[in-house]
Every structure is written in structure tokens, then in C-alpha cells.
Image (cartoon, rainbow, N blue to C red):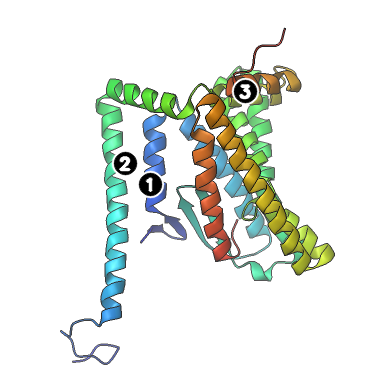
Amino acid sequence: MQDYKGRLYGMKPRGTERKTRKTVHWSAVRLAVSGAVLFAALLVKLLLPEVSDTVSGAVLRAVNGSADYRAAFSALGEALGGRRAFGEAVQEAGRFIFSLPEAE
Amino acid sequence: MDLRIGRLRITPGAVFMTTLLVFLDRDGWAGLLLLAVTAHEAGHLAALGLCRAPVLYVEVSAAGVCIRYAGSLLSYGRELFVAAMGPAAGALLALLAAWIGAAAEADRLLLLSGFSMALTAFNLLPLRGLDGGRMVRTLLCARFGPTAADRVSEGLDAVFRILLIAFGVFLLSKQGSWTVLLAISAILLSLRRRQEYGRVL
């Protein structure tokens, strides 16, 4: 009995086919590991919220430094919503990101 | 191997980035950021639908979302329309969220508006692979032809890449903030990959 390539069933795959199969295998492992890490992160967040908050706070402080991007984006939204003048909001966003001194 | 659901492809990098966002998010800002990205991509998809351009797949990776379409069928005008509809949808979401947020005193909607506006502004930069770059190239192609358009858009791309990296380095040195430099590096690497694929948004 032969397969669609005319080879007998039970034959070992040729070199190039073996390589292809290996590549697919490793990318599937990467996907599975990413999924497992996501699942673990969700579990930690749900079961140990204090630990998760402490770690994420430390990571955010380390990565963001003294810049507050969340406040800067909020200031931008307030400007678009008309809560404050656009120029004033842009200045405030700049203060949150670059720690500029407050205008007199 | 990516996770495939219909024409949606999710890379391991996207799963990893989702993990990072879920873990770092303490008050729901990651969800708002994803909503802003979704509105932007929905604008492109709606435009492709209106132009009857077949979407081959939508890939979600660590650096964002990339739509691959059969663009050889599109005229310059339609290509410009498809590229512009993403930022237009983002700007519309920003204005709507700001308007409702200000009226209802909802700070989360104001934050969503800020995210969406920043995303729209970033996408309008004339970098190859971003909407702004695609729009500039299409306009130049229609006026001066593809050779001159490629030359000018490559020059603009190089200048803006340097400016963005310089901005990231400046924030790192002044504020000790890695965020912008890391985000820009990931996005620039992903844009290089997008250029290899051709017709993508």
C-alpha cells in the first residue's frame, strides 16, 4: 500500500521532512508554554492578589521610572472631552511624562 | 505554529504580551488599550469590506495586529481610503469616549480616549508599515510614480525611526523609563517583518 507520494507506508520520512516536522514541533511548544504562563499568571492574579499587586507594582516602577503614562493619557482624554483647555492638558501630560515643573 | 481561529492567527508572542498586560494591569487599563486597538483594526476591516478586498488573515503578535489582504486589486484611492480608515475609527472612538466621559464624569472613558488618540497619532507617523507611511507612499505614487515614492518614503522612514529611538533613549536617560524604548523597539522590529510580507495594515 502506498501513500500519495508513492512511498510505502511505514517508511521513515526523508531528511527535509524530518526538519519541517521538528520546526512545527518547537513552535507548538512555544505556543503551549506561552499559554501555560498566561494560565499561571491568571491563577496568581485570582488566588494571590496581594502578591500579584506587589510584583506588578515593582515591575511598573522599574520600567516606567518617574514617568506616569496613565495620568498623561487621562489628561489627553480630558482635553478632548473639553474638561480643560487643550494647551493646558498637553502641558500637564508633559509634566507627568517628563516631570516638568508646574507652571506658575 | 500559530493558534488559528478562522482567519485569525495568534502568535506565541501575542499570548506572552497578553500575559504581561494581564499581570501588570491593576485597574483595567489594559482592557481599554485593547479596545482602542480593536477599534483601529475594525476601521481597516470595514474599509476592506467596503472596497471588496479579500482579507487573507489577521495576525495578532506581540507588537500589535496586522491585517494581510489581497491589495493588488486596489486602486490608489481605495488604498488611501483603507489606510486612513484605521486612524479615522481610532479618532472617532477617542472623540466619542471623551465626549461621553466628560458628560458622565467617567474617568475610564477619558483614559480610553487618551489611549485611542495616542494610538491614532502614532499610526499616522510616516513609517513604512504604519498607516501614515502607507498613506504618504500612496499619495506620492499617484503623483510621482512608485520609484520616487519609494525613495522618499524610505528617507522619511529612516528619519522617523531615528527620532523615535532618540525619544526613547531621552526618556530612559531623563526619567529612567524603559517603557517607550521597549515599545518602540518591539514595534520597529515588527514593522520590518511586515515589510517582508507586502500588503499588510
Chain name for mark 2? A
- Are the two marked residues, 3 and 1, in contact with CB atoms closer than 8 angstroms? no
Q: Nearer the viewer, mark 3 or mark 1?
A: 1
The spot of residue A44 in percent (x, y) is 26, 30
Label 1 packing within 10 angstroms: few (<14), some (14-19), many (20+):
many
Tell me which amino acid carries mark 1.
Val
Q: Chain of mark 3?
A: B
What type is the residue that disc 2 sits on? Leu
Tell me, yes or no, whether the two marked residues, 2 and 1, touch with CB atoms within 8 Å.
yes
Separation of residues labelled 3 and 1 (CA atoms): 31 Å
Sequence-wise, the earlier of marks 3 and 1 is: 1
At label 3, counting other C-alpha atoms closer than 10 Å, the crowd grade (few under 14, some 14-19, many 20 or more) is many
Estimate the spatial distance between the alpha carbons at disc 3 and disc 2, rounded to whole Å: 32 Å
Q: Quadrant of residue A23?
A: bottom left
Point out residue B100 in the picture as x, y percentages from the top left corner.
Answer: 64, 25
User: Residue under circle 3?
Assistant: B101
* Residue at far top of view: A104
**In the image, A46: left or right of B113?**
left
The mark lying in front, picked from 3 and 2, is 2
Residues tagged by mark 2 and mark 1 found on one chain of the structure: no
Q: Secondary structure at mark 2?
A: helix
Name the residue carrying label 2. Answer: A38
**Does residue A20 appear left or right of residue B171 in this picture?**
left
Chain label for disc 1: B
Numbered label attached to residue B79: none
Residue pictured at 32% horizontal, 60% vertical: A27
The secondary structure type at the circle numbered 1 is helix
Q: Is residue B55 visible?
A: no
Q: Residue at x 44, y 57 (%)?
A: B9
Q: Provide the residue designation for mark 1.
A: B15
Could you tell me which residue is drawn at 68 percent across and 26 percent down? B99
